[in-house]
Image (cartoon, grey):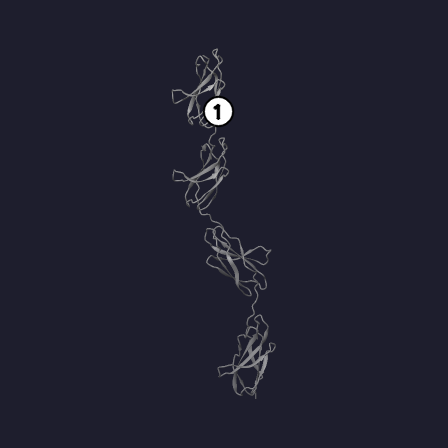
Amino acid sequence: VPARPTSLVVTDVQRDSIAIKWKPPKDDGGSPILCYIVEKRPTSSKFWSKVTKVDADTTELYVRNLHDHAEYHFRVIAENKVGQSEPLETQDSTMAKSPFNVPSRPTGPLEIKDVTHNSVDMAWKPPQKDGGKPVTSYIIEYRVLSRTFWSKAGTVDGKTTTFTANNLMEDTDYMFRVTAVNDEGQSPPLESDESTKPIKKINLPGQPIYFRATKIGADFAVMEWKPPIDDGGSRITGYVILKRESLDDERTKMTSVTSHELSCTLKNLRQNVNYYFSICAENKVGLSKPADADHAVCPMRQPQKPSSPRGPIKVTDIMKTSMNISWKHPEDDGGSPLTGYLIEQKESKRQYWNKVQQLPATVTSFNIQNLRANTEYDYRISAVNKIGYSEPLISDASTMAKSPF
C-alpha cells in the first residue's frame, strides 16, 4: 500500500465550505496511486464521514455543505491497487465561516446637532473597519433614559451619516445609538455620550405687518400695525419704533410700547421733514428685523380756520347814527391767508346778530352807519380764510349811538 499523502493544509475558508490541499505520498508502494479518499469529522463527533473520492491527479478540494461556524477536521487517504494508505489528518480543526466580518462600530462621537420640541438631528462618521464588505445601512435607535429597552427610530443608507429622529416627546430625556450594517451583520452600536431632551426652540419673532401712518399732523403722526405672524415661539412682549430722516442714516430708537398697543402717536416731529419709520417686535429672545412703513411720513401743517381777531374792539367817533370800530389781525391765519373780515352787530336788547359788512383782509376798521339814536349796540368780528370763519371777537361792552353834544 502507498504511504500516506503529505502536506495537508487548509487553503480557503467560507461560511459553508473549506478548501484543502495536499501532496502525493512519497512512496506509492510500487503501484501508481489510483485515487484519494477525503473524509471530514466535526469536532462535536468522533466519527469520520466520507466526503468524496477524487482521481490521482487531483490534490485539492472544496469540501462543501458545511455548517456555518462549525469546526471540522479533515483527512486524506491515498489508494493504489493493493489498498489504502494510512490517513493524513489536519493537525487543528478549522471553523467554517465567512472570511468577512461585521463592521466595527460607527466612529464617534454621536453628535447631536439640532434639537426642537419634538425632534433631534444627529451625525456620526463611518466605522474605521467595514469588515471587508461595504456598509449598506445604519440603524438608528432611541430609548427613554428612564427605560431599558431600545426602539427603532429609522434607517439610512450606507452613504448617509446624518439622521433626524422625529415624533419625540417634549421635555423627555433620550439616549440614541447607531449601528452599522453590512452583508455579514450588524456592528456594535455607537451610543450617545449623554442624554438629550427635546425642548421648544425659541427664536426671534417675525416682523410686524401692515405698518403705516393713519394720520399726519403738523408735528405728529399716528402709526398703526398688526402683530407678526410668527412670535418665534414666545409671546410678544412689546414693540420698538425706530426713525431715520434719510435711507442712508442709521435707525435710532424713538419710542417703545407694550404688546397690547397696536398704534402709537409719534410727537414733536419737525414740519416738512421726511421721516422713515420702522418697527420691531420683541420677545424674550430679542428684537425682530425692522419692518419699514409703507412710505415716508412728512409732517406739515394742515390749513384750518384762523384764530379770532385780536381785541379789544375799539369804538370811536360815536354819533347819533354812526360809530367807528377797529381791531387787530389774528395771531394765526390757520395756515391759509386771510381773505377778509365779517362784521356783525345787534341791538343789545336783541338776541340775533345781523351782518353789517364783509371787508377785505387788509382792513381793520370800519365806520358803521344808519344806527338808531340812543340805542345800544354790540359788535362782533370774525376772521375769514378759505377754510372758514374764526371764532368771533365780541365787543366787551355795549355802545350807545348818541350825539357827542
Which image quarter holds the N terminus? top left
The image position of residue 106, as x and y in percent, is: 48, 35
User: Residue pushed farthest front?
Assistant: 81
Q: Secondary structure at mark 1?
A: strand
- Residue 266 visible within the image: no
Which of 369 and 3 lies nearest the eye of the viewer? 3
Q: Which residue is mark 1?
A: 12
Residue 197 horizontal/vertical position (percent): 43, 43
In the image, residue 93 lies at what x, y percent? 43, 21
With respect to residue 347, does 256 lie above or below?
A: above
Residue furthest to the right in view is 362
Residue 51, x across and y down, in percent: 43, 22
Q: Quadrant of residue 82?
A: top left
Residue at the extreme top of the image, as rendered: 30
Tell me: residue 42, above or below residue 149. above
Quadrant of res 246: bottom right
**Depth check: 134 or 23 in front?**
23
Q: Residues within 10 Å of mark 1 (few under 14, many from 20)?
A: few
In the foreground, 365 or 178? 178
Tell me the quadrant of the picture where the C terminus can be found: bottom right
Q: Amino acid at mark 1?
A: Asp
Q: Is residue 17 above or below residue 84?
A: below
